[in-house]
Amino acid sequence: MIKKISSLLIMLTMCVSASAKETITVYSPYSASHAGTTATRKVFDVANSAQNKYQFVLEFKAGAQGVLALKEIEYNTTGKLAIIHAAFVDNVDKKMINESDYVPIHALGDACWAVVSLDGDPRLGVASLASTREIVVGTVGFGNATHLTALQIGSRYNVPVRFVPFKSNYDSMMAMVGGHGVTFNLERVSVIEQFRDKNPNLKILAMSCPVRHPDAPTVKTLKEQGIVAPYVFNTIVAHQRMSRDRARELGAILDKATLTVGVDEIRRLSDFRPAIFDRISAEEFTRRRTAMVKQLRQQHRQAIEESR
């Protein structure tokens, strides 16, 4: 009887402790199928288990190239965070948001994804697209990493680029696999391999990441092939009205959880490489990545505007 009461008290204490946690909602601009979702949830699970103060919860708020997710944190600047990606720069340019309103606190980092095309020759890489009539890129945001990569390749080899908007990268890949007009995308190597049975014409021409992917060691990176292009990147931001101490505290919890999960596991789950593994702060990482996007968007401003 005493043991039973003791066990009940322990369970009650655990329930009270869990319910006492403050919920921190992190809004994702993606759908649940996004490659980074599984890794983000894993980090949150570890963060939630490692401390008793906060409970991190991921919610999806796709739409408007990430603006909907960012708008959510304006209403509760102490208990909400949001994920940004390269389209953040486009939203700033269109004055839909103010860049200074958002403070990076944790970076899921760069995605090491493949440049996949229905055209070209894997043995020759992206240079083989020089003989194609047109690059049709499907992605979620004007002037985002995928769009800019296509524009950089098109500019290098004098091939026109046509933009087709989609709600998610998954939808774009489905259109590509189904032969519905899209010929170019960025996607995980593992995802491309899964779809090869349905469409054997899927060709990996390059890797969009700093170093070669271990699952495709013979595929050269874009940089090795002379193409400068931004990577797909994700950063968790707080609103600037959140106290700096609180923002740093939340970021530190997520950084620590990320280190616990480990770089290999995060790569396995998402093919992302968080900035913490390179000892780069979320703010510095985001500054570097958005600076490149801004530079290339300025270079291709006319093409981006004509795509709208």
Image: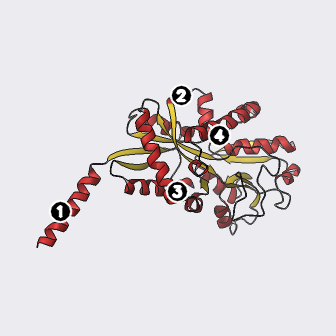
| Amino acid under disc 1 | Leu
The residue that disc 4 covers is 289
Q: Which mark is residue 9?
A: 1
Rendered residue at 31%/48% (across/down) = 21
* Separation of residues labelled 1 and 3 (CA atoms): 34 Å
According to the picture, the residue beneath numbered tag 2 turns out to be: 100
Q: Which residue lies at the image location 49% right of the left edge and 58% below the top edge? A: 260
Image quarter of the N terminus: bottom left
> Badge 3 is on which residue?
39
Please, what is the three-letter code of the amino acid marked with disc 3? Ala
Give the Cα separation between the discs numbered 2 and 1.
48 Å
* Quarter of the image where the C terminus is located: top right
Q: Earlier in the sequence, mark 2 or mark 1?
A: 1
Q: Is residue 80 left or right of residue 147?
A: left
Under mark 2, the amino acid is Ser
| Residue lying at the far front of the rendered structure | 279
